[in-house]
Image: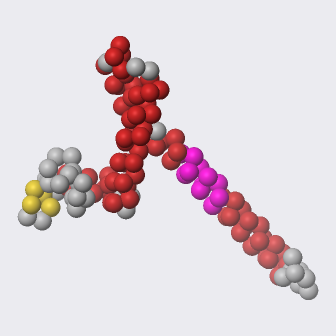
Amino acid sequence: MSHIRGRSGPDLQRLLVISQRLRLRERLFWARIVASLAGGAVLSFAVPTLITSLVWMWSWPSAGSWWGVFWLSSGALLPLLYAIELRTGGDFHMNELRSRQAGGQVGNEAVPAGCGAGIGVCG
């Protein structure tokens, strides 16, 4: 801590408090990043798990193993979901809500049900 040498009294105390707060802020920042990544990884498989469970329950004898259906739906859905997320800049749900709040109208053209405003995925 070379920046603290030569300082005494209130200046030293203030620098120590600032340095502790910065360390705490950095730790909280990294904890938030790790939590976001962990939560995102878990939530990425929420939709494929739900769809796999529904498909497997509805066609149980002919669907094969649950894990096979899960990996198939994950392989199909995850790239699609991430492509939509990248294309909309992370605002897919906000675009969808705005288009529904506007009565399905965007400018002069109607938006089909299930398509967000300006997304371009539906056609």
Front-most of 2 and 84? 84
Q: Position of residue 74 (x, y in %)?
A: 42, 38
Q: Is residue 9 above or below residue 20?
A: below
Residue at horizontal 46 percent and vertical 39 percent from the top? 45
Residue at horizontal 31 percent and vertical 19 percent from the top? 58
Residue at horizontal 40 percent and vertical 20 percent from the top? 64
* Magenta stretch bounds: 29-39
Q: Position of residue 51 (x, y in %)?
A: 36, 31
Front-most of 5 and 60? 60
- The answer to if 18 sits in the magenta stretch is no
Q: Is residue 94 left or right of residue 67?
A: left
Outermost residue toward the top in this view: 61
Front-most of 95 and 15? 95
Q: Is residue 49 visible?
A: no
Q: Position of residue 13 (x, y in %)?
A: 84, 75
Q: Position of residue 41 (x, y in %)?
A: 52, 45
Residue at horizontal 71 percent and vertical 69 percent from the top? 22
User: Which color scheme is applied?
Assistant: secondary structure
Outermost residue toward the bottom in this view: 6
**Magenta portion: prevailing SS class:** helix
Q: Is residue 117 left or right of residue 40?
A: left
Quadrant housing the N terminus: bottom right
